[in-house]
Image (tube, helix red, strand yellow):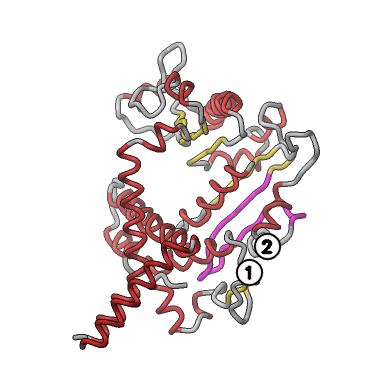
Amino acid sequence: MGSLGVEFLKNALWLYQVAGYRLEINIVDASVASNGAPKSIRKKLAHLWPGLIDDPEKESFVKEEDGFAHYDIRFFENVDCFTSDFDRLFREPESAERLRRTQLAVVTLGDDDKNIEAAISLRALFDRLNGITNQTVKDRRAGRRSPAEQPMICSVVYDQQKAENLHCNTGGGGLVNYRRDSLDINFIGSLQSQFTYDEISRQNGVELEALRYHLDWLRKDAEKSGTLNRQQSQKLAEDTLNTTKAYMDFEYYRKSSVASALHVSMLHYVADRLANTPEPDAVAVRSLLSDRAEESEHMRWDVYMLTQGYQYGQTRADRAKLHPDLRSRDEIDPLEWSKDRRGQQ
């Protein structure tokens, strides 16, 4: 849980805020710095995100109230993933039940070789926990459904040569065992995976969509007024330039708008998954993309601001990182809620 692990956690917390779903996160950390000194990831996050990790002495942080972001965060500190203490988490009933529900595991130990080794070990532990057999792997390779679950595992590998040797991001099978069964480990972080033409094009698309979200409130205000006279058109043009400049000059606006754009893509992804289930619920899909989209957006914004270091305050004070809208949707002024729906918090 170095700086990269913290960034993954921060993004996962707001990206996976979807109305009707529950986000569960398990954080395993050895709690020892590179110089051997003890440390606590909870205390670090309590300093960075005091509105989210409000008591560094607790091991779990749960919020399931309506109108707020939903999350269930559990810390497993002083656990080295290369010791039997880590293996024990997959056997003890309480922790094993949580880990069995894992859908995505991310390995960020700060060292490529350790990340590779830990990811391989993690695949074995999850397969034992979930009862994955050779027949399960064979069925999945043949496209047949299986009741056994296996989480996606992503492991950071920066070194380009290692990434190529592991067949990362080339459409190959990646790491395999002696039976040539893929271990289904996604290695991320190499220059090739981050800066291919396709990836840069995708990132540019997200940036353009983010700028559209940023400017959207101006467009909606203009629509309300109907036909614009010359003076109003001039003011709209000036406001657009000033707003675009703010987007370019200040990271807060850009990151918040990019977060909105990525979150909308997540809602569409979940809706597609719903639509492709054996018994698709068309009402649930429409609700997720319309009625509950506003609820999901407030959930996302709520936890996004918390991970920017904000806390609830009766009066907005940005230098002090206090915001009056960090509360239940039902408690927010209707005018503010209407503005928030346009992404201008």
Task: Look at 52% across and 61% down and name the residue there.
Answer: 304
> Quadrant of the rendered structure where residue 319 is?
bottom right
**At x 31% / y 30%, what residue is drawn?**
144
- Taking depth in this image into account, of 2 and 211 the one nearest to the observer is 211
Which residue does the image show at 36% across and 52% down from the upper left?
Answer: 270
In the rendering, which numbered label is found on residue 311? 1
- Determine crowd level at label 2: few under 14, some 14-19, many 20+ residues with C-alpha closer than 10 A: some
Q: With respect to residue 144, does 99 lie above or below?
A: below
Rendering coords of residue 280 (x, y %)? 28, 52
Q: Secondary structure at mark 2?
A: loop
Upstream in sequence: badge 1 or badge 2: 2
Determine which quarter of the picture holds residue 243.
bottom left
Magenta stretch: give its range.
56-75
Residue 154 is situated, as x and y percent measured from the top left of the image, at 49, 35
The local crowd at label 1, few if under 14, some if 14 to 19, many if 20 or more residues have their Cα within 10 Å, is: many
User: Secondary structure under badge 1?
Assistant: strand
Query: Residue 75 — which label?
Result: none
Observer able to see residue 51: yes
Q: Is residue 42 left or right of residue 172?
A: right
Q: CA distance from mark 1 to mark 2?
A: 7 Å
Tags 1 and 2 in contact by the CB under 8 Å rule?
yes
Q: Amino acid at mark 2?
A: Pro
Question: What is the three-letter code of the residue carrying label 1?
Answer: Gln
Say which residue label 2 marks: 50
Residue that sits furthest to the top in the current view: 178
Relative height, residue 253 to residue 340 (above, below) = above
Residue extending farthest to the right is 37
